[in-house]
Image (cartoon, rainbow, N blue to C red):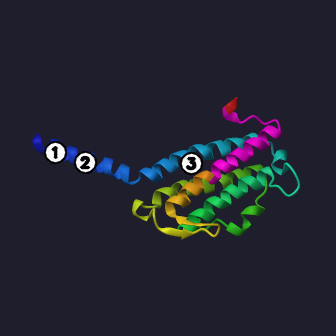
């Protein structure tokens, strides 16, 4: 009985230790999952015609903003050493058209981003990465991925309100 109790305590401590080792990654993943879900809900709430709407000349349209988020997910992950899937054409993302195709591209990049987060080991979080727009460690890169999605969620909320679209979670 004593051996079983000691074994269970050891296993429990190991599981808790592993959870703490990946605390930053799992927390970022959880927040990003929520942001991504709301961006997809907004994407689905816009009509096909509204995907071409832009607040003014020279500013991203609804569709362009969504594809920008998709591209940034791949870009940030690639800078941390995780190549996009072989069937993703980074240079062709901006050419995707149609509501269904844009949403599919966004969902695919979202899944890739969430997988990538957990591939960054805790021992690697402080490794410096040159993202082109800034040098920061991998933890900063993961936070940038999360923040970038949140930034564009706000942009898309403003676009939605301007077009009479109520964010689905606000109904």
- Residue at the disc numbered 2: 11
Return the disc, 2 or 3, that comes first in the chain's sequence. 2
- What residue is at 88 percent from the left and 55 percent from the top? 57
Q: In the figure, is residue 32 to the left or right of 48?
A: left
Which residue, as the protein is rendered here, is positioned at the far left? Answer: 2
Numbered tag placed on residue 6 in the rendering: 1
Out of 88 and 60, give the one closest to the viewer.
Answer: 60
> Around disc 2, counting alpha carbons within 10 Å, would you say few (fewer than 14), some (14 to 19), or many (20 or more)?
few
User: Magenta residues: mostly which secondary structure?
Assistant: helix
Disc 3 residue crowd, few under 14, some 14–19, many 20+, Cα 10 Å: many
Q: Is residue 55 above or below residue 95?
A: above
Q: Name the spot of residue 133 as percent of width and height, x first.
A: 65, 67
Q: Position of residue 49 (x, y in %)?
A: 85, 46
Residue at coordinates 16% horizontally, 41% vertically from top-left? Answer: 5
Can residue 83 be seen here? no
Question: Element at badge 2?
Answer: helix
- 45 relative position to 22: left or right: right
Gap in angstroms between the C-alphas marked 2 and 1? 9 Å
Q: Secondary structure at mark 3?
A: helix
The span picked out in magenta is: 148-169
Residue underneath mark 3? 32
- Is residue 150 in the magenta section? yes
**Label whose residue precedes the other's in the sequence (2 or 1):** 1
Specify the quadrant that holds the C terminus: top right
Closer to the chain start, of discs 3 and 1, is: 1
Residue 160 point in image, percent of width and height:
77, 40
Q: Secondary structure at mark 1?
A: helix
Residue drawn where x is 71% and y is 58% of the image = 68
Q: Evaluate whether residue 6 shows in this view.
A: yes
């Amino acid at each position: 009985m004593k051996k079983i109790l000691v074994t269970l305590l050891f296993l429990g401590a190991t599981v808790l230790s592993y959870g703490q080792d990946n605390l930053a990654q799992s927390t970022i993943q959880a927040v990003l999952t929520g942001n991504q879900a709301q961006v997809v809900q907004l994407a689905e709430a816009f009509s096909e015609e509204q995907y071409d709407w832009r607040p003014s000349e020279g500013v991203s349209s609804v569709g362009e903003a969504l594809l920008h988020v998709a591209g940034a997910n791949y870009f940030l992950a690639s800078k941390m050493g995780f190549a996009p899937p072989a069937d993703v054409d980074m240079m062709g993302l901006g050419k995707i058209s149609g509501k269904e195709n844009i949403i599919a591209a966004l969902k695919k990049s979202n899944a890739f981003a969430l997988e990538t987060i957990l591939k960054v080991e805790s021992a690697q979080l402080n490794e410096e990465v040159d993202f082109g727009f800034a040098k920061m460690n991998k933890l900063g890169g993961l936070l940038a991925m999360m923040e970038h999605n949140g930034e564009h969620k706000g942009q898309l909320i403003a676009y939605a309100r301007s077009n009479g679209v109520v964010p689905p979670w606000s109904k």
